Amino acid sequence: MSLGILFGILREGLLGEFAQAHASLPFGTHYPLQTTNSSMRIKLLIGLMLLSGSTFASDAKLKPFTSDGCSAFPDGSLEQRQLWLQCCTEHDYAYWKGGTYKEREDADFALKACVEKVGEEEIALLMLAGVRVGGTPFLPTKFRWGYGWPYPRFYGELSQEELRQVEDAAKQARGKP
C-alpha cells in the first residue's frame, strides 16, 4: 500500500470523523477526542500496522551500494570537475545504509566539513542546505536517507541482520568474499 493511501486513510478516518463529532461544539471549546465510531479505530489500527510493518520489516533486503555523485549538484568546480566528488560518495554511502536521525545529521555535517576541507566553504553551506531538505526519508527519491532499503524506510537503528547486510555489501563492493 502506498504512503499516500495510508495518509488518506488516516486523514479521512481521523480528521473527517473528528470534524463530524465536534461540528456542533461552540467555537473555541476544547474537548478530548472521543468517538464511538469503531470504523475510525479500525482505520487507525490498520494504518499504524501498515506503517510499522513497512518501516521495521526485518526481512528487507539491502540493494547493492550505488552512488550518483553529488546527485543534482555538480561534482566539482569548472576548473576541477571532481573536486568534492569523494565527499559526495562518502555521504551517499551513509545515506544508502540509513539509520537514525542523528546518523543522518552526522553524515550531512561530515559532507559539509569535507567540502570545506577542499576550500569551498560557500559551496559546503549550499550542499548542507540541499541535503537537509532533499535527503528526507519521507520522499521516495533515489537519494533519500536509507535509499538502499525498500521504500518506505524511515529513521531508526539498524538491526543486527541489517548491519550484517551492510557489512556484506561493503565487502562485495571492495571485492572481498
Image (cartoon, rainbow, N blue to C red):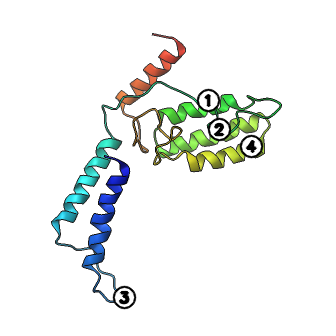
Mark 1 or mark 4: which comes first in sequence? Answer: 1
**Residue found 69% across the figure and 39% down from its top:** 113
In front: label 1 or label 2? 1
Residue 27 marker: 3
Q: CA distance from mark 1 to mark 4?
A: 16 Å
Provide the residue designation for mark 2: 111
Q: Label 2, label 4: how many angstroms apart (C-alpha)? A: 11 Å
Q: Quadrant of residue 14?
A: bottom left
Does residue 12 sit above or below 47 in this rendering?
below
Q: Which residue is at the front of the view, 78 or 161? A: 78
Mark 1 burial class by Cα count in 10 Å: few <14, some 14-19, many 20+: some
2 vs 4, front mark: 4
Residue in view at x 49 percent, y 11 percent: 176
**Residue 89, disc:** 1
How would you rate the neighbour count of disc 4 (Cα within 10 Å): few for under 14, some for 14-19, many for 20 or more? some
Determine the secondary structure under disc 4: helix
Q: Is residue 96 above or below residue 172?
A: below
Q: Where, quadrant-wise, is the C terminus in this rendering?
A: top left
Judging from the image, what secondary structure is the residue with disc 3 in?
loop
Q: Earlier in the sequence, mark 2 or mark 4?
A: 2
The alpha-carbon separation of the residues under discs 2 and 3 comes to 50 Å
- Residue 172, position as x, y percentages in the image: 48, 16
Measured as percent of width and height from the top left, residue 56 is found at: 33, 40
In the displayed structure, does residue 152 sit left or right of residue 57? right
Task: Answer with mark 1 or mark 3, whichever residue precedes in sequence.
Answer: 3
Query: Is disc 1 placed on a helix, strand or loop?
Result: helix
Q: Amino acid at mark 1?
A: Thr
x and y percent of residue 149 in the render? 42, 34
User: Distance from label 1 to label 3 (Cα)?
Assistant: 54 Å
Q: Are marks 1 and 2 in contact (CB under 8 Å)?
A: no
Residue farthest toward the bottom in the current orientation of the protein: 26
Disc number placed over residue 123 in the picture, else none: 4
